[in-house]
Image (cartoon, rainbow, N blue to C red):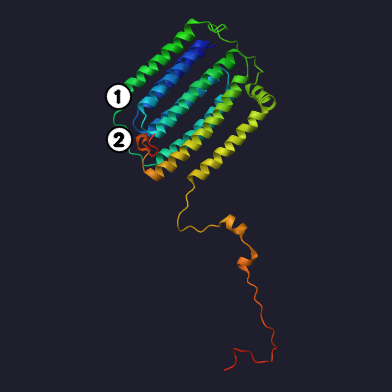
Amino acid sequence: MLVEILFWVFASILVVSALAMIMVKNPVHAAMLLVLCFFTSANVWLLIEAEFLAVVLVLVYVGAVMVLFLFVVMMLDINVEAIRLRVTRYAVVGGIVAGIVVFQIVSVVWTRSLGIDVTTGAQAKPPGYSNTAELGKALFTDYVYPFELAAVLLLIAIVAAITLTMRKRPGLKYQDVSRQVAVRSRDRVRIVKVEATRPDAPSEETKP
Amino acid sequence: MIPLNWLLTLSGVLFAISVAGMFINRKSLILLLMCVELLLLAVNFNFVAFSRYLDDIDGQIFVFFVLTVAAAESAIGLAILVVLFRERRSINVEDLNTLKG
């Protein structure tokens, strides 16, 4: 019973904060409300015993992605009023589309049996069950190649983000590695043939 | 335990809210990116719920990969946004008409 009450509380907070997120004018407020959405979702996932993903959601989304969003929002000087000029015209279309989506999903979910008993819910896991251990077993046996691919994808994302945002200022002194590598010895050292002379013999320059 | 159709309905409502948010905020690129994040969260709800009720851990693995791809997407998207703002001094979608598409 307590779980159901908590679910309704979390679900209402989630829906209200998502609605507020798409309505507010200020992007900083929208980002903060999105943080609330993610945190509440993590709580709902804890209620249905997906503990590892709930912790990952808080760590990755609230800790990294939303901080990145806030950083970018605060770094850019966005003129909020100029962007949100004609809001009401599209709000009507958006509301109609959202209503159709909700109607379709509700009509499918609540009228058709999904092949499993959807009314009672799954059994609770035994006390010694570890969601993290089960997830780790699957991730490092059946899904080890996709896991490696995900790591490569993140590396590509890092390289792409740094390459895109790196700025070359005009007065900056930096080493051009390709020019350093491409240099040849005859560009730097000039070998001059010098006529050998005796030390006591008067040279051309010292002659008056 | 929470019935499965409660969770699926909550996920559907979240999805619809983020779709409506894309219509409402269709001029600001950064709010569009936030709506995409919310949309992916709604999809992840479905994965977690079905994984729990079918007692199959693979659904949660997929949520893991969706989170990875979403993090990479938002990092590159925000980098493009920063470069765009540096060039144009604006992130309004209607200013992005260089290609005359």
Residue under the point 53% across and 20% down: A45
| Secondary structure type for disc 2 | helix
Residue A70's place in the image compared with A18, above or below, is below
Decide if residue A82 is on the left or right side of residue A46: left
Camera-nearest label, 1 or 2: 1
Number of marks in picture: 2
Residue B32 versus residue B60: which sits nearer the camera? B32
Q: Chain of mark 1?
A: A
Q: Residues within 10 Å of mark 1 (few under 14, many from 20)?
A: few
Q: Quadrant of residue A31?
A: top left
Q: Amino acid at mark 1?
A: Arg
* Residue A145 horizontal/vertical position (percent): 66, 29
* Residue A103 horizontal/vertical position (percent): 41, 12
Q: Chain of mark 2?
A: A
Residue under the point 66% across and 22% down: A134
Residue under the point 40% across and 14% down: A100
* Residue B42 horizontal/vertical position (percent): 48, 21
Contact between marks 1 and 2 (CB within 8 A): the answer is no
Q: Which residue is mark 1?
A: A89
Q: Which residue is mark 2?
A: A81
Q: Amino acid at mark 2?
A: Glu
Numbered label attached to residue A56 = none
Mark 1 vs mark 2, CA separation in Å: 16 Å
Quarter of the image that includes the C terminus of chain A? bottom right
